[in-house]
Amino acid sequence: MKKLIKGLREFKSSYFSTHQELFEQLSHGQKPRVLFITCSDSRLDPNLITQAQVGELFVIRNAGNIIPPYGATNGGEGATIEYAVEALGIQQIIVCGHSHCGAMKGLMKLQGLREDLPLVYDWLKYAEATRRLVLDHYSHYQSEELLEIMIAENVLTQIENLRTYPVIHSKLYHGQLKIYAWVYQIESGEVLAYDPDKHAYVLPQSQLTESDTEDPILNQFPNCDMAIRSPHNQGVASENFPIPHLSPEQRERIYRGSNHSN
Amino acid sequence: MKKLIKGLREFKSSYFSTHQELFEQLSHGQKPRVLFITCSDSRLDPNLITQAQVGELFVIRNAGNIIPPYGATNGGEGATIEYAVEALGIQQIIVCGHSHCGAMKGLMKLQGLREDLPLVYDWLKYAEATRRLVLDHYSHYQSEELLEIMIAENVLTQIENLRTYPVIHSKLYHGQLKIYAWVYQIESGEVLAYDPDKHAYVLPQSQLTESDTEDPILNQFPNCDMAIRSPHNQGVASENFPIPHLSPEQRERIYRGSNHSN
Amino acid sequence: MKKLIKGLREFKSSYFSTHQELFEQLSHGQKPRVLFITCSDSRLDPNLITQAQVGELFVIRNAGNIIPPYGATNGGEGATIEYAVEALGIQQIIVCGHSHCGAMKGLMKLQGLREDLPLVYDWLKYAEATRRLVLDHYSHYQSEELLEIMIAENVLTQIENLRTYPVIHSKLYHGQLKIYAWVYQIESGEVLAYDPDKHAYVLPQSQLTESDTEDPILNQFPNCDMAIRSPHNQGVASENFPIPHLSPEQRERIYRGSNHSN
Amino acid sequence: MKKLIKGLREFKSSYFSTHQELFEQLSHGQKPRVLFITCSDSRLDPNLITQAQVGELFVIRNAGNIIPPYGATNGGEGATIEYAVEALGIQQIIVCGHSHCGAMKGLMKLQGLREDLPLVYDWLKYAEATRRLVLDHYSHYQSEELLEIMIAENVLTQIENLRTYPVIHSKLYHGQLKIYAWVYQIESGEVLAYDPDKHAYVLPQSQLTESDTEDPILNQFPNCDMAIRSPHNQGVASENFPIPHLSPEQRERIYRGSNHSN
């Protein structure tokens, strides 16, 4: 606590004093362009990893970056989403999971939480679709890989939940809203973004270089229909994520996108 | 979005590459010392204002830094608190409001939200105790001052709500948990911390210099019972927060603590 | 039933006929000074144990004298509290538990209730903070003593829940409301009252004799902030309630206060 | 408060000391025969008006003696009913309203409560069936009479709500439970009991004298199906309660039963 209080003073004398004008301006109102929904995990700092300035990211954080479906509960998630999209007019939402997520580890051994962490147990109900999908389709994977799959799938689950909110539903319909699925890798410092065309998580940088338009990602996802997955429907299993038919090496190459990285 | 994706690359090549060891270590587990509960507002970056490193702050963010009382809902707040305190063993909680809070502005004109922002309207029910207290006791204040009072009082309301959680209740009982009330001022870059002895928000720095012990704040607040206020019971109106009997200038001096600042 | 109907006639011909003026007056309106919240238990009659006259006590009774936190449910407790404090202007609240409480016994073997008494099981969720605290800190006590501790702690838990109600929050803030914690002992006919300064349950009579003012108890508890406990924070274990470091005999003497009685 | 504390001492030295054996016995367990559900009103003391001894009445009290239908909420009413009937084996339930009931007055001007008493407003939702019935069928009555009708009808409404609880439903089916509707008149000290055969509230004493059996009321109501009202179905309008076709004088005679009283 002493350290944090010292940090407050340090912030004021360094960052704040060199950005005083920005803060003065911000005191008259915020105009964030992005709603960033992520986990409470201390190892993930949204502003740090995106190098976003103060005022740019409107942030929701809870255990597991979970969004209960509309009507399921009256927690802060729905209200904050409504405020972001309706009152602030935000048009871009990022749901960002991360490697080594404690909530997703909990989801893998759910029954064990019932006694000791009853509220977490109840909360993970809203990630049950993730658990079920992974149980049904990825049971041949082992613990670490299974966790990675769970993390990546859960981001997509939560985006489906997000789509159940009236305000989201309506704005998506009119193309006034884009939703992005990210997974942050603590150990590599990289973010992977879900590519709905490839049905795979890819480096967002690789997407960026393919285009020079003002906002290439937006152009790339004209419908931004994140729910278009269910890869097996489409007979293009080799491009699906996660890729159950590939060897771990192949999967590694595609999922981690490691050979694209600098 | 393009900017954020560029930021990701920048983060990796700059901050991440110079802190690679830290991230490697963090990938094996987090040990945050503080649960930081604050607003989703884009102008408030917890890690920036406290200069905390990655791995130090476990963060809950929603509109208005609101904690529904235990059992009131099944949103992420309760589960995340339980995970922080029970699974991670965090022993310090900061609830941090901020100036110009949109949620608190909403609370001041609650009926107007019913139609357009129904989820926000429902959510603000958990700040009704704040609204009621301010209506009952501060009706002679005008809009800007009233908003400040609401913001400061709401942090204390939410701490009372926090105390209804079984895990919080139990840990507080045996002194295994400390709770702090902060308000961040966007325009000045300062944080004010509630001092339960003085019944006032003061500069936490001023508290720090009074002592040299390892964790002086903890020692200064042996009970750290944030709910100990009800100032008017005590016949010490001059020390009360907010200070209804003082002139705005006097109030400014004490509440903002501006002339104590460095 | 026959007996009760005979009782009705007896009441009319005896008590009612000698207090006709009082009842005539009461038919024009009630002005109770105290809201008495207690258990449904048939062995506890609030008017009898306080010798209060008709018209003096506004009474809430349910299994376990439990108050769900604000917003947690829409049962009668919140509405009745609001009516008492806001509409009737009551300024004193007593939460009164009692020895041998069946609801608290249920709390000790909670899982066993799930099947047979599902509504009781759900209801005891609002005493979970009691259960948790006792499990965490009093596991070395045996059944009967543990039950006593649970009963006494639950009264304090419920007072914390009570504090989350907007109308309570606001009135407490300005000293317009006092809350008292009582435990009634069926076998001894005694009531013990929580003393926030001593962090112990004591005989309320002993408090009364220390002062001669009009309402000595009110003066003795200027803050009457029942939530001020967390005894172990304060290094005064010998005054704590319940007293884990004392022998059962010592504890008996202090807790029961039996040798202080007249 | 001083007076109550003196009352505690008085109770112990008088009533308790002369009934010490009873209390000693009760400390081993309660065996109440009746669940008495009534209003929190300070002017109604269940034990006093029935002259019941300690240990005889298991009591639920809230504003308006209201029982939310099963599943409608998770307040104390349902749990306490379940405990009474299932755990304690109680076989008789009395729902007792009373004249000049503040909750019923609130029901008559419901919209006015929305702002100032929001929890009471929400709570009265469970008496909406009463309000609707009275609005639909008794709109030609004026304020005082209308209030009386509302009070009497509300007891019957709440008994219908009571019948929705699984445990009540099942016990009623097998004749293991009897439910009685009472209205207590503060100014006369009398109780009127609903007579399902006559569709009217009558003096329970008058019922008692008609029979010499051990428990004549039980015999008189073989089905004790309190919900058998909807008097107009039965072509016996002249005996219905409330009696819309009679003059106020006639109604007075029957409803109040005043000329039958001793």
Image (cartoon, coloured by chain):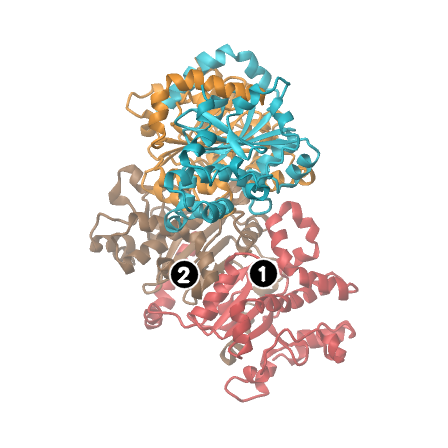
Chain colours: A cyan, B orange, C brown, D red
Q: Residue at x 76, y 80 (%)?
A: D235
Q: Residue at x 59, y 50 (%)?
A: D119
- In front here: D84 or B239? D84
Label 1–label 2 contact, CB within 8 A? no
Total count of labels: 2
Crowd class of label 2 (few under 14; some 14 to 19; many from 20; radius 10 Å)? many
Q: Residue at x 56, y 82 (%)?
A: D217
> Which quarter shows the C terminus of chain C?
bottom left
User: Secondary structure under badge 2?
Assistant: helix
Question: Residue C106: x, y in percent?
Answer: 38, 61
- In front here: C180 or B261? B261
**Rendering quarter of residue B111:** top right
**Rendering quarter of residue D153:** bottom right
- Reply above or below: B10 against C144: above
Question: In the figure, is residue B71 to the left or right of C26?
Answer: left
The residue under label 1 is which amino acid type? Pro
Q: Which residue is mark 2?
A: C103
- In front here: D72 or A153? A153
Question: In the figure, is residue A7 to the left or right of C80?
Answer: left
Residue C220 in view (yes/no): no
Question: In the figure, is residue C243 to the left or right of B126?
Answer: left
Chain letter of the residue beneath label 2 in the structure image: C
**Disc 1 to disc 2, how far (Cα)?**
21 Å
Q: Which residue is mark 1?
A: D68
The residue under label 2 is which amino acid type? Ala
Residue C130 tag number: none
Question: Residue B6: x, y in percent?
Answer: 53, 18
Crowd class of label 1 (few under 14; some 14 to 19; many from 20; radius 10 Å)? many
User: Secondary structure under badge 1?
Assistant: loop
Residue A115 in view (yes/no): yes
Question: Residue A21: x, y in percent?
Answer: 56, 12
